[in-house]
Amino acid sequence: MTFNDVILRQAFSRALAVVDLRLVCSEVGDFANAIEPSGAGGLKIAQALVRALGASAVQQRATTVTAG
């Protein structure tokens, strides 16, 4: 919890968006073990990141790479 609080405080102080994985992976089936997401949890994380980036997985038809 301490690490999460530090991350959130830093994000708030810089007005950054945060994807809180504690809220994304909230079911027992989201975890393969105590710290690793299962396939279902990984899918939830990927979907949350797509939403946070304002993208649509369905509309994205080509791979894009953004650097710098």
Image: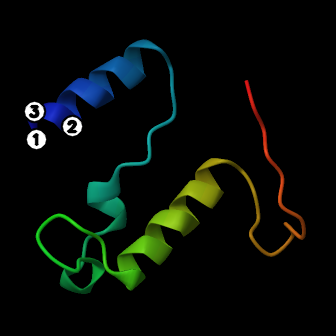
- The residue at 56%/68% (across/down) is 47
* 25 with respect to 61 (left or right): left
Q: x%, y% of residue 11?
A: 40, 24
- The residue at 22%/25% (across/down) is 6
Which label number is shown at residue 2?
3
Residue 38 or residue 55, whichever sits in front: 38
Q: Where, by quadrant of the figure, is residue 45 drawn?
A: bottom left
Query: Mark 1 — residue?
Result: 1
Marks 3 and 2, Cα distance to the nearest angstrom?
5 Å
Neighbours of disc 3 within 10 Å: few (<14), some (14-19), many (20+):
few
Residue type at mark 3? Thr
* Numbered disc total: 3
Query: Mark 2 — residue?
Result: 4
* 25 with respect to 60 (left or right): left
| Tag 3 near tag 2, CB within 8 Å | yes
Residue type at mark 1? Met
Helix, strand or loop under label 1: loop
Q: Where, by quadrant of the figure, is residue 8 drawn?
A: top left
